[in-house]
Amino acid sequence: MLTLFFIFHFAMKFSLFSAIALFAAAAIAQTNNTITDINGRARMLQEKPDLDDAEINRECHKQNGNYIPSLKAGQYATNAFHNCFRTIDQIYEFTDALVAQNPTLLSKFAISTTYKGATIYGYKLTKGHSQSLYFQAQLHAREWIAGSSILFSLASILDDVANKKPTAADEYDLYFVPVVNIDGFELTWNGTRFQRKNANEVDLNRNWPTPNENPNPHAQNSPRYPGPKPFSEPETAGINDWLETKRDEIQGYLDIHSWGGLILYAYGDNDEPLGGGFDEKFEVLARGLQSAMGEYKTGPANSLYFSYGSFPDYGNKG
């Protein structure tokens, strides 16, 4: 069974913990879905895959190809779409179908573009609230399960709305961006499975502004190369431009990764406390999620290692 790892980065301004917890519960449920049986055991990045993940999932697609005709409100999370990891075309086909079936609740919007000119799409789930939460995944191309968790969570929340169950959408509008690094993601499906950076070979989770410069900057051939300057990449620059128009509206951010069994919060580029009681609140939330998810460790992002130019620090300081 595949060992799945998530890093949850929280960059929050107010007390939004109950809504975040509802979303996280849906995301973690994805780890128990049949998708967990696709890849076999976990492996180190240095290992050559015994079988090509893309080919395994293309075979899975042949067995689970009828997901659009079978889409039904209240049953989105059990749809065959979730039985495989999906390509970007399949992801947009699925989410576009969700929009078509829920036109008053869900809408599609362009949030940015990629180095190669692809449009990065997001989805807004709204009940007309004045405040919102923002969720994104796959700044790192190879982290397929991160994007899948966003999609499963969106489907689960739509199901709960249809079945009149409580959701985070009862308190906030929700923005979902399932795949930021589309160019890199497509490379992972075409022979470069462990691609982390974008097509311009920049780590998109090091390309955000930070007041603390890395004393040991990464070289261009490093997997953590931050680019020549913050927002040098169209992916991050476009998301920043969009977020700047939503600063008063968006009350919290959740950035999902799959590096390790960790629940992390700011800061990553220094070991100073957040202050204002937020360190304690984050710890309470993190431990609550840890209790629900099992063997996960919690703490500030710098407890893993110092990271400069990451999205969570940008979101918290913005």
Image: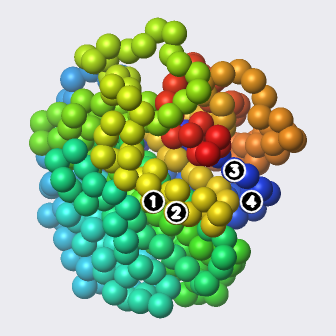
Amino acid under label 4? Leu
- Please provide percent x and percent y for residue 80: 32, 70
Mark drawn on residue 242: 1
For marks 4 and 2, the one nearer the N-term is 4
Residue 41 rendering spot, x and y as whole percentages: 37, 34
Instruction: Name the residue carrying label 3.
Output: 12
How far is mark 3 from mark 1, CA to CA? Answer: 18 Å
Q: CA distance from mark 4 to mark 1?
A: 22 Å
Q: For mark 4, does the 10 Å Cα neighbourhood hold few (<14), some (14 to 19), or many (20 or more) residues?
A: some
Along the polypeptide, which appears first: circle 3 or circle 2? 3
- Residue sitting farthest toward the right: 277
Mark 3 secondary-structure assignment:
loop
Tell me which amino acid carries mark 3. Met
Q: Secondary structure at mark 4?
A: loop
**Residue that label 4 marks:** 16
Residue 58: percent from left, percent from top = 15, 54
Which amino acid does the dot numbered 2 rest on?
A: Thr
Q: Depth check: give the residue in front, 225 or 51.
A: 225
Instruction: Give the residue displayed 17% in from the left and 47% down from the top.
Output: 116
Mark 3 or 1 closer to N-term?
3
Taking the view exactly as shown, the residue that stands out farthest to the top is 216
* Residue at x-position 70% and y-position 31%: 299
Identify the disc placed on residue 245: 2
CA distance separating discs 3 and 4: 8 Å
Mark 2, secondary structure of its residue: loop
User: For mark 1, does the 10 Å Cα neighbourhood hold few (<14), some (14 to 19), or many (20 or more) residues?
Assistant: some
Q: Is residue 264 above or below residue 150?
A: above
Q: Residue at x 66, y 70 (%)?
A: 131
Amino acid type indicated by mark 1: Trp
Mark 4 touches mark 2? (CB < 8 Å): no
